[in-house]
Image: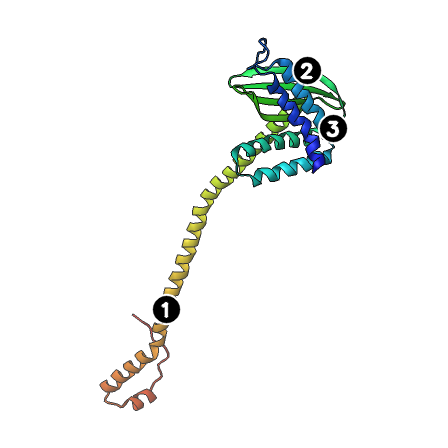
Amino acid sequence: MKKRKFILAPVLLALSLVFTGCGEKPDTTYNGVTRDQLEQSSESIAKVLIQLTPDQADQYVSQYESKMKATTDTTEKEQYKMYYDMLSGWSETSKLVGDFKGFTDFKVENAGKTIVTTLTMHCTKRDATLVTTYTKYNMQPTAINVNAVYSLGEKMGKAGLNTVMGICIVFIMFIILSLLIYAFRIIPYLQKKYDEKHKTAEAEGEKAESAAPAAGNDAEIAAAIAAALAYENDMSIEEFTDSFVVRSIRRI
């Protein structure tokens, strides 16, 4: 823990350099802070980051992430987030830029209520930038970000890839919408077929039900006819039925 505090101490010292010159020199240009002081502060922060190994940077990232979650003080949370963004940015960027060679450029932008400084670090694989944002009225740092610098070709390649992915997503959505629209046309047809089949099954069931009682009543009808004929011929039913056989009955 002591080693970690010792490593980050130069960062705090570098940031404090911004305020040492406030109001001391009449030729200051950024609320009492000169361009040289801002550049010196950025270079001091960059030198501290360069000395960190990837494992150390990852440890600091975890440390400040835990501190952000643990504190309820808004000011402390913002400060921890600033260090978290700086260290996580360097953790990712350091894997892309290679070995540090030197500083090549420094810019200061007056952006309304903020002052933004950009320090360019020349490295073996690609350059990196350290971007620090200050609140203008008190020159307090509010954000420190480290980014890798990509060439125009790499930027165009990424833009092209994003464009292709966007077009693919749009076409996939069109295909899904087309299938849904087509499904809306099929569903009524399937519903109609189902209703027709259901009605046919109901009609056949009713027909079978109406035919069954008729078949069951044939014997009763034959007995009634035989009784009537026996009465007309002044015979008993047994005598009458012995003299003939009813082979079929046809409805009229």
> For mark 3, does the 10 Å Cα neighbourhood hold few (<14), some (14 to 19), or many (20 or more) residues?
few
Q: Secondary structure at mark 3?
A: helix
Q: Position of residue 138 (x, y in %)?
A: 53, 20
Picture residue at 68% right of the left edge, 19% below the top: 120
Residue holding disc 2:
105
Q: CA distance from mark 2 to mark 1?
A: 98 Å
Q: Is residue 219 above or below residue 142?
A: below
Q: Position of residue 119 (x, y in %)?
A: 66, 19
In the image, 208 versus 43, the foreground residue is: 43
N-terminal-most mark, 1 or 3: 3
Q: Do tag 2 and tag 1 residues touch (Cβ < 8 Å)?
A: no
Q: Which mark is residue 209?
A: 1
Residue type of the residue flagged with mark 1: Glu
In the image, 75 versus 56, the foreground residue is: 75
In the image, 107 versus 43, the foreground residue is: 43
> For mark 1, does the 10 Å Cα neighbourhood hold few (<14), some (14 to 19), or many (20 or more) residues?
few
**Is 167 placed left or right of 14 in the picture?**
left
Q: Do tag 2 and tag 3 residues touch (Cβ < 8 Å)?
A: no
Residue type of the residue flagged with mark 3: Gln
Residue 154 lies in quadrant: top right
**Is 223 placed left or right of 49 in the picture?**
left
Single out the mark in the foreground, 2 or 1: 2
Q: Which mark is residue 51?
A: 3
Residue type of the residue flagged with mark 2: Asp
N-terminal-most mark, 2 or 3: 3
Single out the mark in the foreground, 1 or 3: 3
Residue 151 is at least partly visible in this image: no
Residue 247 is at least partly visible in this image: yes
> For mark 2, does the 10 Å Cα neighbourhood hold few (<14), some (14 to 19), or many (20 or more) residues?
few
